[in-house]
Image: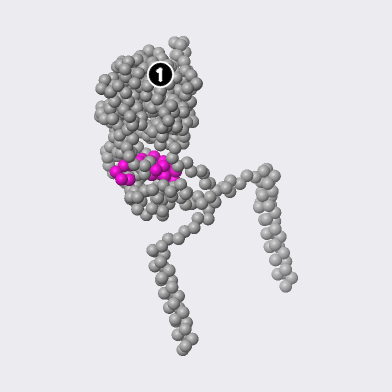
Amino acid sequence: MRERLDAWLIALALLIGALCLGYLSTRFNVSSDWSAGQRASLSAPSRAVLHKLDGPVRIVSYARPGGDLRPTVAAVIAKFQRFKPNITLSFVDPETDPQAMRRLGISVDGELIVHYKGHQERLDQLSERSLTNALTRLARGGDKLVAFVTGDGERNPGGQANADLGTFISQLSQRGIRAVPLNFSQASAVPQGTSLVVLASPVAQLAPGAVRALVDYVDTGGNLLWLTEPGSDELGLAPLATTLDIKRLPGMLLDGSGAALGLHDPRLLALGSYPPSAITRGFVMTTLFPEVAALAVTSDQDWNAQPLLASGPQSWLQAGAASADSAYAKAAGQTRGPFDFGFALSRLSPSPSHNQQRVVVIGDGDFLSNSYLGNGGNRALGERLFDWLLGDDALVDMPSRAAPDRIVRLSQGGLSAITAIFLVLLPLVLLLSGLLIAWRRRRR
């Protein structure tokens, strides 16, 4: 009786212990990452960024239900949630309200919007690095002042007309970028504290004082985004072009290769690949540029000029008027491409408060306009431009943590040896073993 009681008490103790362990497992989580380079968990830089966030983070993923996209997004976010439990993730089906998706500028299945303290960041491609950098920008707080030159027919940063930039700028404002007008008829210089000046496709002649103010701003280390267009004169901006060592080639850049994408107007340039640069690193989305001016560098003494956007080999430069029926004509003296139409310029800043001065010149401003912003990766490219110009590209650069043994490299001799072992020697050993066992059984 005593032995049975002992057995029942031991069983009861084991049951109580199992229940206690089960309860503790719901309250506490202990995990260990044994993978090479600890690639299954967050890196130290990512954890450091999470410690800076003192409020909740809300992430919305606009991914269609079904398939592997939603589970993939949830798995990446789960790594962050282990270190910051007040990160919430929700999914929205973009097909339920297409109008709302257009209003939000959602163009990629699975696109994410990260919300933190009234600001937000967008992610077209999700990875630990991209999400960490987005959280870093949100953690910085404070608005950056971007001045848009006005008064000479430039694109209106707050306008809703087709050629204006209102949609794009309203989305930038949610990322902590504040756009203000800069009219040189009312101001003789760029205001102090301006992080970036944008000159977006003027159509009228700029006053000499305005050009001089822009040149002085660049000479003293200011960052500039200059969007120019084909088919117009210099508008008095020759001194600015000379300061930047950039010139606009005459005529319009046309490209007939867009027909493969359904674009039958050669004035529309579609890009799917880009010259290597700090802005386009890892960028693979297709962008659309209507009515483009080709650009060229006149000198490499003052600036480090990197091509940012370039047309394909099927493009050509056409002088005079261009239409949807334009075609390449060698007899007319037209020049075949490729041509550069976007440059990222950088140099050691003359200002002691900045390390590097940055300028971007692009031969088209329509790609960020209200009419074309929703095409492919136009918005994402625009955000990359502003991030680089505002210095937000120098964020967390995490090294690759791939497994060291993912790839097995064998010589031809090694491959032949493995083939002989598994296809000849091993089957032969098994056959001989079977014959030996059968022979010994017969002898018994």
Q: Mark 1 points at which residue?
A: 241
Residue occupying the point 65% across, 45% down: 410
The location of residue 344, given as percent across then percent down, is 44, 27
Point out the stretch of residues depicted in magenta: 116-136
| Residue 251 included in the magenta stretch of the image | no
Q: Which of 331 and 10 is in front in this view?
A: 10
Q: Which of 257 and 245 is in front in this view?
A: 245
The location of residue 223, given as percent across then percent down, is 39, 28
Residue occupying the point 35% across, 53% down: 86
Q: Can residue 208 be seen in this view?
A: yes
The location of residue 307, given as percent across then percent down, is 46, 26
* Number of numbered discs: 1
Q: Nearer the viewer, residue 206 or 31?
A: 206
| Residue 129 included in the magenta stretch of the image | yes
Residue extending farthest bottom: 1
Residue occupying the point 34% across, 21% down: 213
Residue 109: name its quadrant.
top left
